[in-house]
Amino acid sequence: MPEGGAGTVVVGTRAWGVAPATAVAASGRLVSLLCHSATEADSLDRDRVSPRHPSLPLPGALRPTADRAIVRDADVVVMVVPARS
């Protein structure tokens, strides 16, 4: 993690969360992707691909997590929640 903070945290793993999180992580910055559950975080971490973007591999700098405490030390928090369900 960068000194003084946890980098960027993206809250939301739907298409609009995964895409910007992947773009920022691809630039070499640490990005934590806050998942709804530990199961989802484990799956994304293991497979390194989102079912919503199967052709878009998750960069190594993107860390899926279900630990909501990660937002406390974040330098930037991006909330990406669906407008409709």
Image (cartoon, helix red, strand yellow):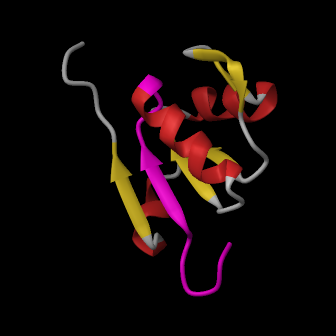
Quarter of the picture holding the N terminus: bottom right
Q: Look at 56% across and 70% down and name the residue there.
A: 6
43 displayed left or right of 20: right
Q: Is residue 4 magenta?
A: yes
Direction left: furthest residue: 83
Magenta segment, which residues?
Answer: 1-15
In terms of secondary structure, what is the magenta stretch mainly? loop
Q: Along the line of sight, which residue is nearer the eye, 58 or 33? A: 58
Residue at the location (74% across, 35% down)?
45
Q: Any magenta on residue 33?
A: no
Q: Quadrant of residue 58?
A: top right
The spot of residue 62 in percent (x, y) is 67, 48
| Whether residue 11 is situated above or below residue 68 in the rendered picture | above
- Position of residue 8 in the picture relative to residue 29 (left or right): left
Is residue 35 something one can see in this rendering?
A: no
- Residue extending farthest to the bottom is 4
- The residue at the point 65 percent across, 78 percent down is 2
Left or right: 26 in relation to 65: right
Q: Looking at the figure, which quarter contains the C terminus?
A: top left
Residue 71 in picture, x, y percent from top left: 42, 63
Q: How many marks?
A: 0
